[in-house]
Amino acid sequence: MGEVFTGNFTQQEKLPDAALAAADAVLRHGRLHRYNTVDGEIAETALLEEEFAASTGASYALAVASGGYALGCALRACGVKPGDPVLTNAFTLAPVPGAIAGVGAIPVFVGVTESLVIDMDDLAAKMGQAKILLLSHMRGHICDMDRLMRLCDGAGVTVIEDCAHTMGAAWNGCPTGRWGRMGCFSTQTYKHINSGEGGLLISDDAEAMARAVLLSGSYIMYGSHRAAPPPEAFADLRFEVPNVSGRMDNLRAAILRPQLKALKRQAGRWNDRYAKMTAGLADVPGLTLPVRPPKEQFVASSFQFLLLDWAAVDVAAVVTGCAARGVELKWFGAAEPVGFTSRYDSWRYAPGAVMPGTDRVLAGLLDMRLPLTFSLDDCAMIARIIRDVVHNVRGVT
Ligand SMILES: *Cc1c(COP(=O)(O)O)cnc(C)c1O
């Protein structure tokens, strides 16, 4: 059978010692609520927001309970009302259309290309249908943001970015999350920094951010934030915006701050692993790697490849063959979703017409996690195994 990989695809690195020490300090003093501080103390949550704003260059940042909460909060802060249509990716993770449904709005799905980004032609065709685009940089693939913003600005469509897979990434030098009116990040365990659950929102728009701060459950304590708009921005809003509690606490913020400091270095390590995978699978007949343009400064925490126009039984054979040799692949074309849902036809609460171009891409799309617990040699071995299995399946049909 050849080589077998024995690593664990869901095991992230342990938290750095600085995170453990910071968590210990918070646990010992017990002031976990972000607004519970003693005289002269600055809450860990407020410090995290200040540091995250600085790291992205955004004017404002807000820490919240989850990435999904950040999405819903951004939609509300940008004025989305029940019944409003909201454009979004046909290929993303369930919390994205879920956030739209959560505010009573209606997802309008836009297709995906072979490069795994939003289909700009499909977007242009559907632009007239909504005032908001919730754009997901799914699996870290970033579309041509210059073109997307031209298109949306021209049509008066507000962009909110889902950056759950693009923390630390940029298009053409400008970080993701800074192109749209608001950018939403996740600090859930499988993302780039890990607090179990958690989310971050950034914006340069004072009114939208003041609304988000109030929505998150700031009561009248927003004055203690260090990356929020000035008090004037809240004056007219504070009795008008409902409290939809979803704050982050000081314990999570404390363990995230040291990880944020290390993000750049970690991003380099992720991309080294991605490069190993790409090199190992560069010229396999029948296998396509998504195009990554030079302007896309991605941070890879997962790896995707396409077996375009393969028969379903053959793709299934690749998945089984790889699994037998310890390589866990997700297949987005499987008849039944396994573990999570990522395609438009799994979200039947939303109206949807069949999207043949998108179906074609998803039918051949395979995906795997690339945790930093894998060494470069591990990645080279995984690539050899995939190459071998793809070759064998292709050879026998
Ligand atoms: C993880 C994820 C989110 C947010 O998820 P939470 O688990 O709520 O933090 C949003 N979009 C995508 C694409 C994701 O993978």
Image: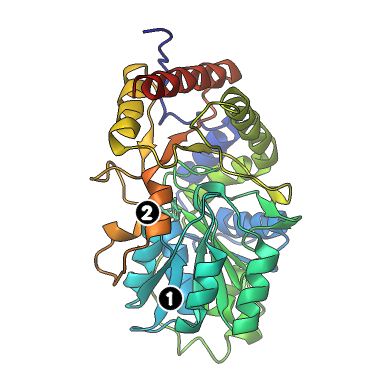
Bin the neighbour count of mark 1 within 10 Å (Cα to Cα): few under 14, some 14-19, many 20 and up.
many
Rendered view: 383 above or below 164: above
Q: Residue furthest right?
A: 173
Rendered view: 57 above or below 210: above
Q: Is residue 30 left or right of residue 314?
A: right
Query: Which residue corresponds to the image point at 58% horizontal and 69% vertical from the top-left?
Result: 182
Q: Residue furthest front?
A: 397
Where's residue 215, x and y in %?
Answer: 45, 75
Provide the residue designation for mark 2: 359
C-beta proximity under 8 Å, tags 2 and 1 = no
**Real-space Cα separation, disc 2 to disc 1, in angstroms:** 21 Å
Q: Is residue 319 left or right of residue 13?
A: left
Q: Residue furthest bottom?
A: 236
Q: Can residue 313 be seen by looking at this rendering?
A: yes
**Residue type at the position of mark 2:** Asp
Provide the residue designation for mark 1: 86
The chosen color scheme is rainbow
Query: Which residue corresponds to the image point at 29% horizontal and 72% vertical from the top-left?
Result: 351
Q: Is the CB–ligand 1 distance for label 1 below 8 Å?
A: no
Q: Nearer the viewer, residue 21 or 227?
A: 227
SS assignment at label 2 = helix
Residue 175 figure quarter:
bottom right
